[in-house]
């Protein structure tokens, strides 16, 4: 697989490539945070840079996930925009988990965390279900199976 496919949402991606890519991206995201925290603790003067570094990595990984999911959606015959609904649920859950919003809505901390957990499960379920759907045979408006558009 070409590395440029991670940054561009065109073309199609089969189930195997999707699963392998998502596992690598999620693992990279989970491993990056402890690394940046260790750097910040080792060199206290770098705390601000570490925070910016973590944010940059999070944004880059989120963009790559959006591109990979778009390619997988293309492979099952849907537009990449279909991912906005479950992603919106996750963003809404993260917003509701913020203490200021939760208190305005009358939610306790535990309830707010449960809302975030449920939103994360909805998005994770979407990602897993997308990996289980079969590839549409033949070429379509998104290109040939497992490749870039024709």
Image (cartoon, rainbow, N blue to C red):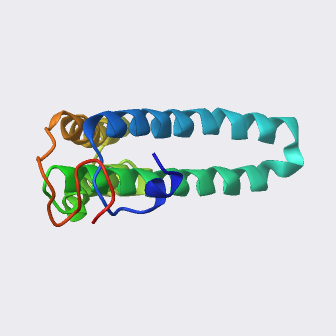
Side of 93 relative to 44 (left or right): left
Total numbered badges shown on the rendered structure: 0
- Residue drawn where x is 33% and y is 42% of the image: 116
Q: Nearer the viewer, residue 108 or 73?
A: 73
Side of 36 relative to 146 (left or right): right
Asked if 89 appears above or below 17 in the picture, the reply is: below
Side of 45 relative to 95 (left or right): right
Q: Nearer the viewer, residue 4 or 122?
A: 4
Give the image location of residue 105, x and y in percent. 27, 54
Give the image location of residue 33, x and y in percent. 62, 38
Asked if 64 appears above or below 150 in the picture, the reply is: above
Give the image location of residue 111, x and y in percent. 29, 37
- Residue drawn where x is 51% and y is 32% of the image: 27
Side of 138 relative to 126 (left or right): left
Viewer can see residue 97: yes
Viewer can see residue 103: no
- Residue drawn where x is 11% and y is 47% of the image: 137
Q: Nearer the viewer, residue 89 or 80?
A: 80
For the N terminus, which image quadrant?
Answer: top left
Give the image location of residue 60, x and y in percent. 54, 56
For the C terminus, which image quadrant?
Answer: bottom left
């Amino acid at each position: 697989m070409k590395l440029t496919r991670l940054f561009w949402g065109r073309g199609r991606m089969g189930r195997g490539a999707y699963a392998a890519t998502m596992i690598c991206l999620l693992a990279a995201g989970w491993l990056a945070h402890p690394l940046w925290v260790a750097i910040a603790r080792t060199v206290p003067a770098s705390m601000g840079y570490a925070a910016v570094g973590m944010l940059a990595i999070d944004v880059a990984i989120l963009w790559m996930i959006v591109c990979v999911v778009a390619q997988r959606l293309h492979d099952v015959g849907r537009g990449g925009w279909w991912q906005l609904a479950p992603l919106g649920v996750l963003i809404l859950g993260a917003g509701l988990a913020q203490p200021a919003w939760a208190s305005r809505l009358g939610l306790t901390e535990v309830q707010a965390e449960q809302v975030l957990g449920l939103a994360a499960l909805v998005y994770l379920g979407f990602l897993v279900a997308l990996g289980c759907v079969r590839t549409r045979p033949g070429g379509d408006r998104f290109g040939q199976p497992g490749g870039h558009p024709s």
